């Protein structure tokens, strides 16, 4: 299960680099079809594939948002550091 979560986070991060947010809709549909197809094939109940679908789709979305959010935070921290250095340099003169 942990491998599946990590793989879906990485897949979401990959998709965020090359596609718009609309790519998540067909990918999540594939997840639904795959999970319920697996449940039917192995004779599982209703709740386990529903839980796995929720977990995988949430991991995809987290991975999709994580990379851009990381770069936004990185750029903000650089900008704040630059502003602090500029203020410190202006005070010296």
Image (tube, helix red, strand yellow):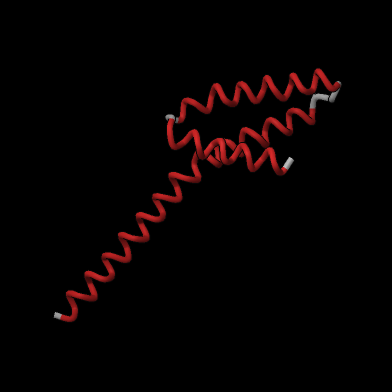
Position of residue 16 relative to residue 86, above or below, is above
Furthest toward the left, the residue is 93
Q: Residue at x 49, y 26 (%)?
A: 23
State which quadrant residue 68 falls in: top left
Q: Residue at x 24, y 76 (%)?
A: 88
x and y percentages locating residue 73 in the rendered image: 41, 54
Residue 51 shown left or right of residue 20 in the figure: right
Furthest toward the right, the residue is 43
Q: On the rendered image, what quadrant is the N terminus found in?
A: top right
Residue 28 shown left or right of residue 83 in the figure: right
x and y percentages locating residue 45 in the rendered image: 84, 25
Residue 86 shown left or right of residue 44 in the figure: left
- Number of on-image labels: 0
Position of residue 71 relative to residue 40, above or below, is below
Q: On the rendered image, what quadrant is the C terminus found in?
A: bottom left
Q: Nearer the viewer, residue 47 or 14?
A: 14
x and y percentages locating residue 54 in the rendered image: 67, 33
Q: Residue at x 66, y 40 (%)?
A: 5
Position of residue 65 relative to residue 46, above or below, is below
State which quadrant residue 46 falls in: top right
Furthest toward the bottom, the residue is 92
x and y percentages locating residue 43 in the rendered image: 86, 21
Position of residue 17 relative to residue 22, above or below, is below
């Amino acid at each position: 299960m942990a491998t599946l979560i990590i793989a879906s986070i990485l897949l979401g991060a990959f998709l965020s680099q090359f596609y718009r947010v609309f790519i998540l809709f067909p990918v999540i549909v594939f997840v639904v079809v795959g999970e319920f197809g697996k449940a039917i094939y192995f004779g599982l109940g209703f709740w386990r594939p529903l839980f796995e679908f929720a977990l995988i789709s949430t991991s995809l979305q987290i991975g999709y948002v994580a990379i851009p959010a990381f770069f936004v935070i990185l750029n903000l921290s650089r900008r704040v550091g630059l502003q602090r250095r500029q203020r410190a340099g202006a005070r010296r003169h």
